[in-house]
Image (cartoon, rainbow, N blue to C red):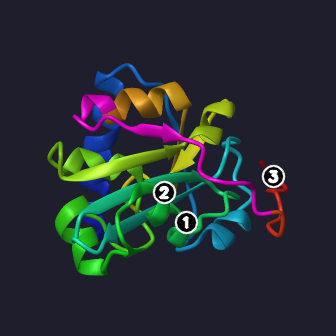
C-alpha cells in the first residue's frame, strides 16, 4: 500500500468512528510490527496495549483474536477448547484478502473491510478492565485509543458480534509499559 492509500484508509476509519459517536485520539510514531516494538515507543495516549492475532483453523476458517498485550495465548489449548482441530497464524496473503491490511497492521478496525460472518472475533475479557485500548488504524505507524465500549460498538456496527472471553493468564515475563 502507498502512503496515500494508508492515509485514505485511516480517514475512512476515523470518519466511521465519528459517525458512530466513538471518541478517539491518535498518535503517529515509527512503524512497529510487534508488541515488543510498541512498548519502546513511549506514547502519550495512555491505555492498554493489545495484540491482535489473525488465525485460521485446519478447515481454513479465520479468527481474529484481540488480546491484552500481556495475555499468554496458547494456540494449542485454544484449539482444544474451541474444538477446531489446530490453530495457526494466517498467511500474509489472507491478511490482505480478508482484512485488507498488511503484516504489522492487524487490528479489529480492519473488520470494517470484512463482510459479517467471514470470521470469528474473540476479544480478551481483560480488555474491558482498561479505560482506553490502543490499536493500529489500519497502518502500523500510528495508534488510535478508544474505550472498550467504543471497540465493542465499532465491531457490532461492522456486523461482527464479538465473543468476549477469558483467554489466559498474563505472561509474567513481559515488562509493563513505562510511559503508559
Separation of marks 2 and 3 at Cα, in angstroms: 36 Å
Picture coordinates of residue 17, whole percent (x, y): 35, 31
Which residue does the numbered mark 2 point to in the structure image? Answer: 81
**Which tag, 1 or 3, sits closer to the chain's start?**
1
Check disc 1: other Cα within 10 Å, few if <14, some if 14-19, many if 20+. some
Give the mark, 2 or 3, whose residue is nearer the N terminus.
2
2 or 3: mark nearer the eye: 2
Could you tell me residue 96's position as x and y percent?
23, 70
The segment highlighted magenta reads 156-171
Q: Residue at x 28, y 23 (%)?
A: 19
Proximity of marks 1 and 2: CB atoms separated by less than 8 Å: yes
List the residue tagged with mark 1: 77
Q: Which mark is residue 179?
A: 3
Secondary structure beneath disc 2?
A: helix
Which residue sits at x=70%, y=58%? 70
Q: Nearer the viewer, mark 1 or mark 3?
A: 1
Residue for point 30% across, 30% down? 156
**Label 3 residue SS:** loop
> In the displayed structure, does residue 11 sit left or right of residue 82?
left
Residue 140 visible in the current orientation: no
Amino acid at each position: 500500500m502507498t502512503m496515500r492509500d494508508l492515509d485514505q484508509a485511516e480517514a475512512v476509519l476515523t470518519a466511521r468512528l465519528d459517525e458512530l459517536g466513538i471518541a478517539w485520539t491518535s498518535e503517529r510514531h515509527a512503524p512497529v510490527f510487534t508488541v515488543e516494538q510498541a512498548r519502546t515507543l513511549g506514547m502519550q495516549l495512555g491505555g492498554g496495549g493489545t495484540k491482535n492475532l489473525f488465525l485460521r483453523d485446519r478447515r481454513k476458517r479465520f479468527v481474529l483474536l484481540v488480546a491484552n498485550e500481556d495475555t499468554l495465548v496458547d494456540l494449542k489449548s485454544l484449539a482444544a477448547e474451541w474444538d477446531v482441530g489446530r490453530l495457526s497464524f494466517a498467511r500474509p496473503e489472507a491478511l490482505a484478502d480478508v482484512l485488507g491490511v498488511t503484516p504489522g497492521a492487524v487490528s479489529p478496525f480492519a473488520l470494517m473491510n470484512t463482510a459479517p460472518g467471514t470470521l470469528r472475533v474473540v476479544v480478551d475479557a481483560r480488555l474491558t478492565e482498561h479505560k482506553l485500548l490502543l490499536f493500529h488504524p489500519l497502518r502500523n505507524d500510528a495508534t488510535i485509543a478508544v474505550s472498550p465500549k467504543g471497540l465493542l460498538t465499532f465491531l457490532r456496527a461492522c456486523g461482527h458480534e464479538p465473543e468476549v472471553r477469558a483467554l489466559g493468564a498474563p505472561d509474567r515475563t513481559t515488562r509493563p509499559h513505562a510511559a503508559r
